Image (cartoon, grey):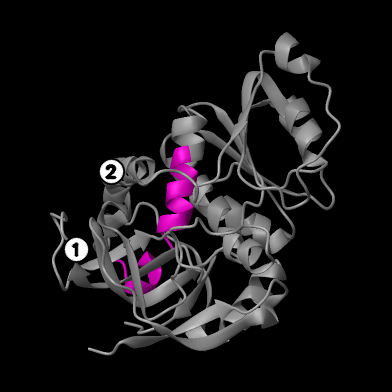
Amino acid sequence: MALTMRAVEINAPGGPDVLQPVERPRPEVGHGQVVIEVAWAGVNRPDALQRAGLYNPPSTASDLPGLEASGHIVEVGPGVSGWAVGDAVCALLPGGGYAEFVATPAAHCLPVPQGLSLKQASCLPETYFTVWSNVFTRGGLQGGERFLVHGGSSGIGTTAIQLAHHFGARVFATAGSEDKCAACRDLGAEVALNYRDADFVSVMKEQGGADLILCMVGGPYIARNLSALADDGRLVQIAFLQGPKAEVNFAQLMTRRLTMTGSTLRPQSDLAKARIAQDLHEAVWPLLSTGRIGPVMDSEFALEEAAAAHARMESSGHIGKIVLEVAGG
């Protein structure tokens, strides 16, 4: 068994070009963990934030980027039950996905859904864990409610639209081009707005306001989101692509009984993530296996082309998920 592996590391904070192919020691399996031979790794916004020096990994995690992957289990650590060497899985990772092998808690693994390829499965963990925990658990979305998601054509957005539509919500989305808006409508959005020429606040107010908004934009959108909410509405913040600061009149939180909350996935405990995995296995994995929902794929790059994959993501030209081919399959 080889003691080293191909990987891509961040050699200094900066742009996509700081992602460099390297040889690294193969990870050792720990208690409660499995080691996965990576077939495909998903590319996500938090990877770019880590690359820029704005989202440091936990002290116990690999310094390599990559928060989701698919592949086959090659080692099972002590204390693990339910998984065996050779099982095809996709997994939420503490880091380290941009590599040939990665160690992760066994409880954060899920089986590759029936009918999906390893490439498709690599797109599931980060987005589905994020959407399920924020839209349904934290945000409490119910059937019949009006749900607005910004960045509707992103990996998070395409997942949120499909799940919210399936569970009976009325879905509204924003995106940056007509092609992206069309993709949102195809996935189940009742209304998709091009944010470059449409005002989502006035549109939502005409509908009675949004019961729930999922936002990764922040900045000037914070105050606008609060205005777009219905009375008793909830705003869930999962990123701040335009900054975390804004001037907001918080009196409306009292007078209209609004709720503002948010979360980020990586710092949460292993147990919290395991609970999300269990929820997904019960409520969402059957939908994936029957083809009622599925990942939206944009493009694929070789592992050594991670810099180009990041450039593609940060161009905001993509619709859906970008993946890296490692072992393939």
Does residue 175 appear anywhere in the picture?
A: yes
Name the residue at 80% across, 43% down: 219
Does residue 208 appear anywhere in the picture?
A: no
Circle 2 residue: 278
Name the amino acid type tagged 1. Answer: Gly
Apparent side of residue 24 relative to residue 107 in the rendered image (left or right): right
Query: Can you say whether 204 is above or below 58 in the image?
Result: above
Q: What residue span does the magenta drawing correspond to? A: 115-133
Task: Give coordinates of residue 166: x percent, y percent.
Answer: 42, 41
Q: Element type at marker 1?
A: loop
Q: Between residues 227 and 104, which one lies in front from this camera angle?
A: 104
The crowding category of the residue bearing disc 2, from other C-alpha atoms within 10 Å (few below 14, some 14 to 19, many at least 20), is: some
- Earlier-in-chain disc, 1 versus 2: 1
Q: Element type at marker 2?
A: helix
Circle 1 residue: 77
Q: Nearer the viewer, mark 1 or mark 2?
A: 1
Name the amino acid type tagged 2. Answer: Gln
Q: Between residues 9 and 214, which one lies in front from this camera angle?
A: 9
Task: Give coordinates of residue 133: x percent, y percent.
Answer: 45, 39
Task: Give coordinates of residue 189: x percent, y percent.
Answer: 57, 45
Quadrant including the N terminus: bottom left
